[in-house]
Image (cartoon, rainbow, N blue to C red):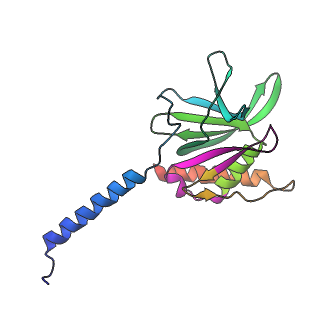
Amino acid sequence: MQPLTDSTIRLLQEQNQLLRALIAAQNKPALGFSDRPPGQPQWIFIGRHGDSCWYSLDKDSKPVPIAHRALTGWITGLAFEKVTRRGKESHKLNATIRTDTTVYTLSTGHDTCFAKSLMASLAIITDVQLRQPITLSVSPGDDESIVWCRLYAPDYVKAPQWDDSTDWRAIAQAALIVVQRGQNNAS
């Protein structure tokens, strides 16, 4: 057998690079809700409406259920906001997810099961995992008011269990830091 020449080695390396790029393109997850046309930033609210666990609002502010169970994209922000709804002050958790075509802001109460499961999952992943698209999946709870969040980065991230003594400020701070670091490293 003859030894490989430098030009043959270079050609094989180029071929390997092309094959890796092809495999990566094939394995790239579909981003966003697959049947939604591109548009302006879209607010998505977490809550049960029929069989759906999240919804948007139409031009008349009426809920429009979203049939999809998962949203895949890059998480680009996590923020807590104090708002007034129906004359009452409330605190919201807003998570911003960017897809190839749309930016979604997911909004939920800061102390909901969705918010807690999202924050607990984000607090235990690495900023490196946030450089790739993640998937947020909604799942209804036993009670009509409960919606859970499952995070995949790319595999399922099991949120730690919590109870009444859980320090949510510390978990929220850890989640905010992970998201911020993920953004800093993505630029």
Q: Quadrant of the N terminus?
A: bottom left
Name, please, the residue furthest toward the right.
Answer: 164
Foreground: 22 or 182? 22
Q: Is residue 174 visible?
A: no
Q: State the residue at coordinates (69%, 50%).
A: 119
The picture places residue 115, in percent across and down from the top left corner, at: 72, 44
When the figure is inspected, residue 78 is found, relative to residue 168, above or below; the finding is above
- Magenta region includes residue 88: no
The stretch of residues the image draws in magenta is 124-150
The picture places residue 140, in percent across and down from the top left corner, at: 73, 42
Q: Quadrant of residue 15?
A: bottom left
Q: In this image, 17 relative to 122: left or right?
A: left
Name, please, the residue furthest toward the bottom.
Answer: 1
Q: State the residue at coordinates (63%, 46%).
A: 137
Q: Quadrant of residue 95?
A: top right
The picture places residue 67, in percent across and down from the top left corner, at: 61, 34
Q: State the residue at coordinates (72%, 50%).
A: 117
Foreground: 145 or 76? 145
When the figure is inspected, residue 8 is found, relative to residue 95, above or below; the finding is below
Q: Is residue 60 visible?
A: yes
Q: In this image, 154 relative to 172: left or right?
A: left
The picture places residue 18, in percent across and down from the top left corner, at: 28, 58
Q: Quadrant of residue 59?
A: top right
